[in-house]
Image: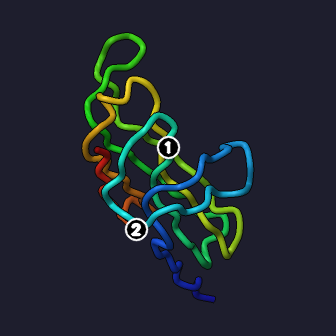
Amino acid sequence: MAKNKIQIEIYSYGKYTQWDRGSKELPKLLDITTEIKAQIGTEFGYVLHIKKAKGELLTFRIDHPPFKDKNGKIAAPFTGEYYVASNDFDFFLGDCIWEPLEDKLGKWHLTTYHNGKVIAQKVLTLY
C-alpha cells in the first residue's frame, strides 16, 4: 500500500511569546512579520503544520548573523533534528535573543528539511 504524501505548510511566522522549550505548548504568535524589532528575550521563528508524517525525521538549520561563541570564535549555524510525534503535528523553529543584542541583529535564515529536501524556509530580519 502506498504511503500518503506528507503535507507541510508554514502556519505562522514572526514574533512569538516566550517559549518554554520543556513544554509541549508552542509559543503564541504576537505578530506575523519578517521584520522584528529585537529586544533581549524576543522570541521569533515559524510554526509548521505537518500532516501524515508521524515518525518522520525533520532536520533544521538556522543561519544567523556572525556572533562569537563562548570561546570567542564565530558561532556555527544552529542545526538539529526532530521526529514528528503525530499525524497532525505543529513544529516551532526559532530562537530567542540574548545578550549582547547588537551582534544578533540582521538576517536569520530558518530552514527545515525532510529527506534532504527543503520543506520550509523563511528569512527573518532582526533590527
**Which residue appears at 58% of the width and 85% of the height?**
4
Quadrant where the C terminus sits is top left
Quadrant where the N terminus sits is bottom right
For mark 2, what is the residue? 119
Q: Is residue 79 above or below residue 102?
A: below
Task: Pinpoint residue 70: horizontal percent, then vertical percent.
Answer: 42, 14
**Could you tell me the amino acid type at mark 2?**
Ile
Mark 2 crowd level (few <14, some 14–19, many ≥20, 10 Å Cα):
some
Front-most of 49 and 101?
101
Q: Is residue 25 above or below residue 63?
A: below
Q: Is residue 99 above or below residue 84?
A: above
Task: Pinpoint residue 115: horizontal percent, then vertical percent.
Answer: 44, 62
Could you say whether the residue bearing mark 2 is in a helix, strand or loop?
A: strand
Q: How is the image coloured?
A: rainbow
Mark 1 crowd level (few <14, some 14–19, many ≥20, 10 Å Cα):
few
Give the distance between the C-alpha atoms of the residues marked 1 and 2, in whole angstroms: 15 Å
Circles 1 and 2: CB distance less than 8 Å? no
Query: What numbered label is drawn on residue 50?
Result: none
Q: Is residue 36 above or below residue 13?
A: above
**Which residue appears at 52% of the width and 80% of the height?**
7
Q: Residue furthest top?
A: 71
For mark 1, what is the residue? 80
110 lies left or right of 40: left
Residue 111 quadrant: bottom left
Task: Pinpoint residue 113: horizontal percent, then vertical percent.
Answer: 42, 59
Say which label, 1 or 2, has the lower sequence index: 1
Q: Residue furthest bottom?
A: 1
Task: Pinpoint residue 103: horizontal percent, then vertical percent.
Answer: 29, 28
**Could you tell me the amino acid type at mark 1?**
Gly
**Which residue appears at 47% of the width and 76% of the height?**
9
**Which residue appears at 61% of the width and 66% of the height?**
90
Could you say whether the residue bearing mark 1 is in a helix, strand or loop?
A: strand
